[in-house]
Image (cartoon, rainbow, N blue to C red):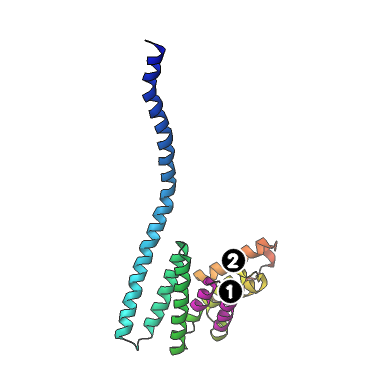
Amino acid sequence: MSDNLKWLLLIPVVIVAISLGYVIPKLVGSDDERPEQRQSQALQLDIDATGERIENYRALLESNPEDVELLRGLADSHREIGSLQAENRQYQESFTSFKTAVDYYREYLAKKPEAQDAGIDLGLTYFYMEMPLVAERELQKVVQSLPQSQRAWHSLGWLQMRLGKDDEARASWQKSYELDPESAVGRESRAFMDELDLSRGVSQNEIQVPPAP
């Protein structure tokens, strides 16, 4: 067989090899993208489901305008969908949802001022809107009106930690912990204090632990 003929016979083999070299990395690359795509699709399903819940709340509110708890449901649902949208990188939609949540929380609190626990979620929503000082102000108002609210003190500590106010954060977590050391919130406050103390090099003997009841 001539050399030219041998080269002609090798051409299909070379073409297949080149094709496989191109296709296989493409397939591997698409596999690498699939988890992120699946996560985005799952988040979108949650967003759509929460959107349907919001529409149901709106319909109920139109039929029952005196039911103030529907305002709380709308506020909570908008805060939830805002968090999902932010996680799914839908930042403009997320901000709009958080802003709507703030409006509903304020309307709810205006009609039911005794429900100050809603102020915790209001404050946290302001933080999600990147308004941390307003968020801190709202949470300070809650702990003043509800000094026995463990969640309020715990949330305030978390916010203060995010603002770099470590001493204030630890004091807030200490109050949260003292209210009920055995609750899930109390245990988390203690864990946060321990982590903060460890990061600052404070020995375990210096950590304040309330006496056993």
Residue at 30%, 80% in the rendered image: 59
Magenta span has 33? no
Residue 18 image position (x, y, % from top left): 42, 30
Q: In this view, does 188 lie to the left or right of 16?
A: right
From the image, state whether disc 2 or disc 1 is nearer to you. Answer: 1
Kind of residue at badge 2: Phe
Name the quadrant of the N terminus.
top left
Extreme residue toward the top, this view: 1
Q: Is residue 133 above or below residue 86?
A: below
Task: Report which quarter residue 166 is drawn in.
Answer: bottom right
Task: Report which quarter residue 201 is drawn in.
Answer: bottom right
Residue at 53%, 75% in the rendered image: 126
Residue stretch in magenta: 120-142
Dominant secondary-structure state across the stretch colored magenta: helix
* Mark sitting on residue 63: none
Kind of residue at badge 1: Pro
Task: Report which quarter residue 192 is drawn in.
Answer: bottom right
Secondary element under disc 2, as helix, strand or loop, is helix
Which residue has dot 1 on it? 132
Extreme residue toward the left, this view: 63
* Mark sitting on residue 192: 2
- How many C-alpha atoms fall within 10 Å of the one at disc 2: few (<14), some, or many (≥20)? many
